[in-house]
Image (cartoon, rainbow, N blue to C red):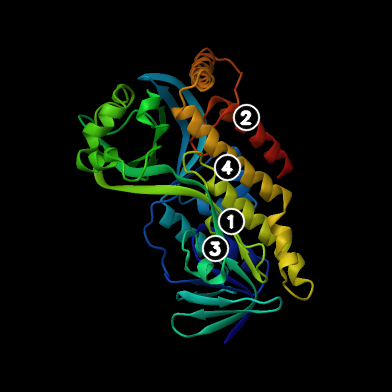
Amino acid sequence: MRYTDIAIIGGGLAGSTAAAMLGRAGISTVLIDPHATYPADFRVEKLSGHIQIERFARTGIAESVLRHATFAGENWIARFGRLLDKAPSRQFNILYDCLVNVIRDEIPENVERVWAKAVSIETSPERQRITLANDATISARLVVLANGLNVGLRHQLGITRNIVSACHSISIGFDIVPTERTSFDFPALTYFSERPSDRIPYISLFPIGPRMRANLFVYRGFDDPWLRELRRAPAATLDAALPRLKRITGPFDIAGEIRIRPVDLYVNDASHQPGLVLVGDAFSTSCPVAGTGCDKVFTDVERLCSVYIPQWLASDGMDADKIATFYADPVKRACDEWSVAKAFDFRSVSIATSPYWMAQRWARFFAWSAQGLLRRLGGVIHLEPNFLGHSSSSSSSSSSSSSRSSSLSSSA
């Protein structure tokens, strides 16, 4: 049996970042994951915006990790086939598996890695016991469950999942290649939907190395025939949904595999569990359309590893009351609440047809147009991105979400 203070189950974005932070702090830690090299996975493909990058910087590993990403310093904003603005941007584009593997390179040697699947956990107010698929066992004072969407261990522990919104959105990823020329004119592009009836908030195009990556977001059921048509005839289906997109991009073809990922919004209730804390998607999911997933991960991990774990290890025991202080952390709660509100605000501003939300859509269109005109005329006024419907992750939000974002950045 191995003995450690902290055992992290799950070596994705949250778990690997936590392992790097705890290792740098000299805290006895074991990272458990089935894969020595994180496999390809369609999840986060960019980090962007001042707030999100600042949150990542608080982990202490951002500077070295972001050197491996493709930087885009300008993002074009367009709708109805019209270029509205060429906005300054801080986009760092990198495929999720590459991001995780680069973060793993930042984990110090004093963190033990165990490449095996955790099959069971026994918790108590003192020490926790983890059994692995190879029959090895690990004893830890605290288990950090960072295994994302995997539900097996949570079911075993009796952790309740509360669904907030089933199939809230669907993310679609693919590469595009220019035709009749060698490259695209834009460094990165966000093109907003032309009609609410298409149930598309926007498509984001951004470079990763020599590739131009597309992230298309839709609000549809996973059994919607439109998704089958997209797989069968991707170019024609996309042209029908966004008929004026190519006025901005020029002609292009869709290349390679199309990846589709539906997202349920849920929160797991582990408040009764001693010796175990949930972070990232293991605690609650976020909507990729709103682009708040990395904000939540970096907030969870930074608060847990910088504030709570050092406090908890300084005294005996690891009971549920001690763990509850993390879930009640005001910075974490503000980020979680902001993320949920932004998910629903964005859905409404994209597809709702009431007079209020129609007015909100036009307000954003005219705001982007005005900012673009001021920039072309050399003006110095810069409207807040969240107010304009473009978040720190190349997505949009309502003005109410903007105020939440501003207050959060101050408190964090």
Residue 343 in the image: x percent, y percent?
53, 39
Q: Position of residue 203 (x, y in %)?
A: 38, 34
Q: Which residue is mark 3?
A: 146
As drawn, 185 above or below 327: above
Type of amino acid at the residue the image marks with label 2: Ser
Q: Mark on residue 61? A: 1
Residue at (47% x, 43% y) in the render: 288
Tag 4: Cα neighbours inside 10 Å, few (<14), some, or many (≥20)?
many
Q: Amino acid at mark 1?
A: Ile
Q: CA distance from mark 2 to mark 3?
A: 30 Å
The residue lying toward the viewer, choosing from 273 and 12, is 273
Q: Position of residue 120 (x, y in %)?
A: 51, 77
Cα gap from disc 2 to disc 4, whole angstroms = 12 Å
> Depth-wise, is mark 4 or mark 1 nearer the camera?
4
Disc 2 target residue? 400
Secondary structure beneath dot 4 equals helix
Q: What residue would you read off at disc 4?
A: 340
Q: Secondary structure at mark 3?
A: loop
**Viewer can see residue 59:** no
Q: As displayed, is residue 325 above or below residue 210?
A: below
Spot occupied by residue 17 in the image (x, y as percentages of width and height): 56, 60
Disc 4 vs disc 1: Cβ atoms closer than 8 Å? no
Q: Residues within 10 Å of mark 3 (few under 14, many from 20)?
A: many
Quadrant for residue 37, please give it: bottom left
